Amino acid sequence: MIPLALILLATSTRLELVNEVLTIPAGDWRYVELGLKQQLALVSAGFVVESGSQHVKLMIMRREDMDRLRAGLPYGVIMASLAAAGGALAYRVRVPGDYVVVIDNRNPDRLAAKARLRVALDFAEGQRPQATRISPQRQLTVILITFVVFFGIVTYSARRLLRGIRQ
C-alpha cells in the first residue's frame, strides 16, 4: 500500500511553492523564485490582503527584470494584476528561464500590507496545448457566412423543387 501511495505522489504534476502570509512594508516588494530553467509549467499565483494597504499588485517577470527593479532601473513585466486588495494570475511559461513572482506594495497610501500569497506550478498544464477562441469579429463573420451559404442552398433547392412540381 505504501509503495502505491509513493508512486501516486511521484506522478503529481502540481507543486505548491508558497502558501503563506507575508508582511510587505510600505513602498517595498517581495518575490518568489520559480526556477523554470529546464521544464515548462503553468504558473498560478494569487493573493488576498488580510490587513493594511488595499493597493497591492502581483507581477510575473523574468529574473533580469527583477534585478533591474531592485536597481531602480526601467523593467519589464510579463503579466501583472491591478493594484487591489486581491488578485490572481495564470501564465503558461513557454520558454525555459529564470522567472519570479513579485508582490508589490509601492503605492501612494504609505501603508504596510499583510497578504496571503499562493504560488503553484503545474507541469502537466505547461505541456498541454492551450485552447483558444477566435475573436468576436471572426465569430460573427463565420456565423454570417454560414447563414448566407445555408439560405443560398435552401433557396436553390426550393426553386428546383418548385420548377419540378410545375412541370
Image (spheres, helix red, strand yellow):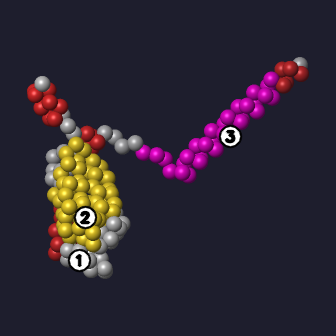
Q: Nearer the viewer, mark 2 or mark 1?
A: 2
Q: Residue at x 36, y 43 (%)?
A: 130
Looking at the image, is 151 positioned above or below residue 54? above
Which of pointers 2 and 3 lies earlier in the amino acid sequence? 2
Residue drawn 89% across and 22% down? 166
Q: Please provide percent x and percent y for residue 7.
A: 14, 30
Looking at the image, tell me whether mark 3 or mark 1 is earlier in sequence order. Answer: 1
Q: Is residue 65 visible?
A: no
Q: Which residue is at the far left?
A: 3
Q: How much space separates mark 2 and mark 1, taking CA atoms?
A: 15 Å
Q: Main secondary structure of the magenta part?
A: helix
The part of the image, by quadrant, that contains residue 9 is top left
Q: Which residue is labeled 3 in the image? A: 148
In the rendered structure, does residue 60 fall within the stretch colored magenta? Answer: no
Residue, disc 1:
27
How many residues crowd mark 2 within 10 Å: few (<14), some (14–19), many (20+)?
many
Q: Work out which residue is located at the far front of the displayed protein and give it.
A: 51
Q: Nearer the viewer, residue 157 or 30?
A: 30
Residue 110 at least partly seen: yes
* Residue 143 screen position, x and y as percent: 61, 43
Amino acid type for the residue under numbered disc 2: Ala
The amino acid beneath tag 3 is Val
In magenta stretch: residue 150: yes
Q: Earlier in the sequence, mark 2 or mark 1?
A: 1
Q: How many marks?
A: 3
Split into 4 quadrants, where in the image is the C terminus? top right
Q: Position of residue 91 (x, y in %)?
A: 30, 53
Which residue corresponds to mark 2?
Answer: 115
Depicted 165 relative to depicted 100: above or below: above
Stretch of the chain drawn in magenta? 132-161
